[in-house]
Image (cartoon, grey):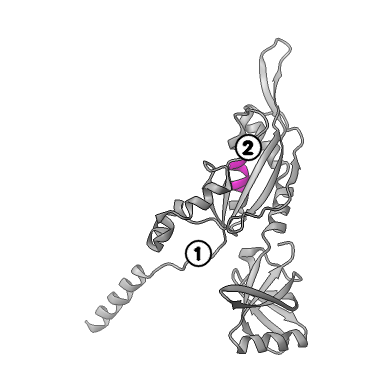
Amino acid sequence: MLKQIICAIMAAGALTASPQPDTRPVVGVAQFTCQENSPYTGLVTEKVAEMLTNTRRFRVVDRTSDDKIRAELELQKSEAFMDSKNLVEQDIAVAAEKMITGHIVKIPVYAIKNSDGSRRGYKASVGFEMKLVDVATGLSSEATSFQGKASKECLSPEAAVTMAMDDIKDEIGAWFKINFPVTAKVTRIIDNKTLLVNAGTSQDIKPGDTFTIDAVETIDGMPYHREIGTGKVNKVAGPGFSECTVSKKTMSDISSAFDNATEILCTFKNR
């Protein structure tokens, strides 16, 4: 009987255990602006947000109704962000750390007609610029231009615009990697040349990937980064960890920082 009671208590504990916090960066996508009055502006914005979500590296929040960074700054001053409980419970109130903004330069949609004048289908192309804005500072990256080729013939204008966006998804993915480098923490020193970092297949880390290593201290309430070396992934140990090799000098600096409880961050290149 006692054994059954213990099992019941353990089962109840498992059911009520708090989920692990989602520590992924929070990125907002603002409604793109358009040089012309196109009904497909929202579709382009949605496709960018979808591509960002599909990387599974971010918590993507909907900011399509706020096309200015000022709106995001004001939003984060609201009571929803002052109350940590609300912050957890109301996904819509998650504060974006970075914002993606865009401006569509052109988005022509052509109707393809049969010889008798009836409409057979549609083709489309799209050209736009994107910027990344740091919400805390208001500073933005240089605008990057994207130009999709004309789509194949599609049954609807929406399908044609979607195909035109899919044509440049690799370029957009490369932009994500440049502007959102993967960062990971050194969680353990395995031996005198090997360390363990908390990034793996979930972050698309692969053997041979290289990264820079910073010791991060908090000085006057602000993080101070000091680069102490570079490293290379030797083995990816599942979704959340990788074993990496570093030089003896770098390992000596890491060990010293570890002993002083200093955070060690690794920034992967082009990931």
- Name the quarter where the N terminus is drawn: bottom left
Q: Is residue 46 magenta?
A: yes
The residue that label 1 is drawn on is 22
Q: CA distance from mark 1 to mark 2?
A: 31 Å
State the predominant SS element of the stretch in magenta. Answer: helix
Is residue 65 visible from the viewing direction of this image?
yes
- Of the two numbered discs 1 and 2 on the same chain, state the one appearing first in sequence: 1
Q: Is residue 260 left or right of residue 82?
A: right
Q: Nearer the viewer, residue 237 or 19?
A: 19
Is residue 190 visible from the viewing direction of this image?
no
Q: Is residue 10 left or right of residue 243?
A: left
- Name the quarter where the C terminus is drawn: bottom right
Task: Answer above or below: position of 169 versus 189.
Answer: above
Query: Circles 1 and 2: CB distance less than 8 Å?
Result: no
Q: Where does the image place residue 270, in percent across and percent down from the top left?
A: 74, 62
* Residue 33 - label: 2
Q: Nearer the viewer, residue 121 or 126?
A: 126
Query: Residue 80: which quarter of the image?
Result: bottom left
Q: Where does the image place residue 253, in percent across and percent down from the top left?
A: 71, 86
Q: Is residue 104 left or right of residue 27?
A: right
Q: Which region of the structure is painted magenta? A: 45-51
Q: As shown in the figure, which amino acid type bears the numbered disc 2?
A: Thr
- Crowding near the residue tagged with mark 1, few <14, some 14–19, many ≥20 C-alpha atoms within 10 Å: few
Task: Answer above or below: position of 109 versus 10.
Answer: above
Q: Is residue 21 magenta?
A: no
Residue found at the far front of this picture: 220
Query: Residue 247: which quarter of the image?
Result: bottom right
- Crowding near the residue tagged with mark 2, few <14, some 14–19, many ≥20 C-alpha atoms within 10 Å: some
Q: Nearer the viewer, mark 1 or mark 2?
A: 2
